[in-house]
Image: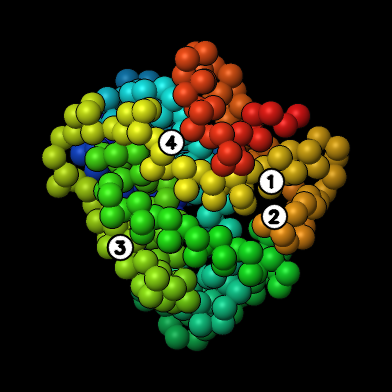
Amino acid sequence: MNDIRLVGAYASPYSRKMRALLRYRRIPFRWILRGSREDANTPPVPVALIPVLAWSDTDGAHAMVDSTFQIARLEQYRRERSIVPADPAVAFLAALVEDYADEWLTKAMFHYRWAYAPDAAKASHVIPLDQNLELAPDLLARAAAAFAERQIGRLAVVGSTPETAAAIEASYRRLLTILDAHLRELPFVFGQRPSTADFALFGQLSQLAAFDPTSAAVAAATAPRVVAWVNRMDDLSWLADPSAEDWTPRSSLEAVRPLLTEIGRVYVPFLIANATALASGAKEVTCTIDGTNWTQTTFPYQAKCLRWLREGYAALSPNDRAAVEATLAGTGCERLFSAT
């Protein structure tokens, strides 16, 4: 891989996830703002999503989307400063946390950004300026109004409604409490070095704890350690080269059970219900999450996430699967691999 480029946006949690990852791994790359003049030569991708990871090699120019698969491609390219734990059982658990952050925590990010007027006002005015600082005031006002109207109209699509708001916000607050307590003992989710889980959590928290006013105020008031961690995660290029001993051994995974219990409490019921609804041909998924009636549009991609998790679980050796099962027992996450 040569001339590696990451095309993204500052307000995109997945862009921030991948930029921080590349920095930590000390992989030379160019950060390119989506829509900028420098973006004009980015190879086409199947869907208009960011970030785009682009590179060239002897076969020509390439580009791909989806941060999870981008991580896998970079792991193939270079193993130094890997973010995938060497122990398959720990790596699987890290992938589960990554999936939760990418697919559930993003609901909180979207909710806080567009359900609160001050947050929507900030996002709708700042994000267009990220791409064009020279926007005239009248053009900015029109762009902000159109942007806010479109995004606010999508709140229910991701599950944010007046009925679910309290559950979303309670889940965010619990996550902050869990991470704040965890960071008193360990600097990263799975030990002394960052994993896929950390970068996925960071991506969403780069917005929740650092950009959007309401959720950032909650983080500052209740979990200042998490706010400091987010600042640190943005650029870990300074961190010394890790060793294999820096990963949490499978015999010491008790520390991650509070986080897994939160995942089992909110994300697992949605994943299962979403897949069931899609299998029946339903356009909406209806379920109960943390005692709240939850209804939203079905998400085909998240059904794929469940399938990929189950495939990863099935691919584990019997010994590795037993270690995963022991860690997940009683968290609610075990339902992912027993439900049909």
Which quarter shows the N terminus? top left
Of 127 and 260, the residue lying toward us:
260
Q: Is residue 318 visible?
A: yes
- Label 3 sits on residue: 225
State the separation of the CA atoms marked 1 and 3.
Answer: 29 Å
Q: Is residue 240 left or right of residue 223?
A: left
SS label for mark 4: helix
Disc 1 to disc 2: CB gap under 8 Å: yes
Task: Quickly name the residue at label 4.
Answer: 94
- The residue mark sitting in front, 4 or 3, is 3
Q: Residues within 10 Å of mark 4 (few under 14, many from 20)?
A: many
Q: Is residue 14 left or right of residue 110?
A: left
Check disc 4 and give the amino acid type: Ala
Q: Nearer the viewer, mark 2 or mark 4?
A: 2
Residue 269 bears which disc, if any?
1
| Mark 1: amino acid | Pro
User: Mark 2 sits on what residue?
Assistant: 289
- Which one is in front, 304 or 124? 304
Residue drawn at x 39%, y 55% is: 179
Residue at the spot 63% in from the left edge and 64% down from the top edge? 167
First along the sequence among labels 4 and 1 = 4
Pick whichever, 221 or 308, lies toward us. Answer: 221
22 lies above or below 84: below
Name the residue at the top extreme: 318
Q: Is residue 44 among the parts visible in the rendering?
A: no
Residue type, mark 2 in image: Ile
What is the x, y in percent for residue 296? 75, 56
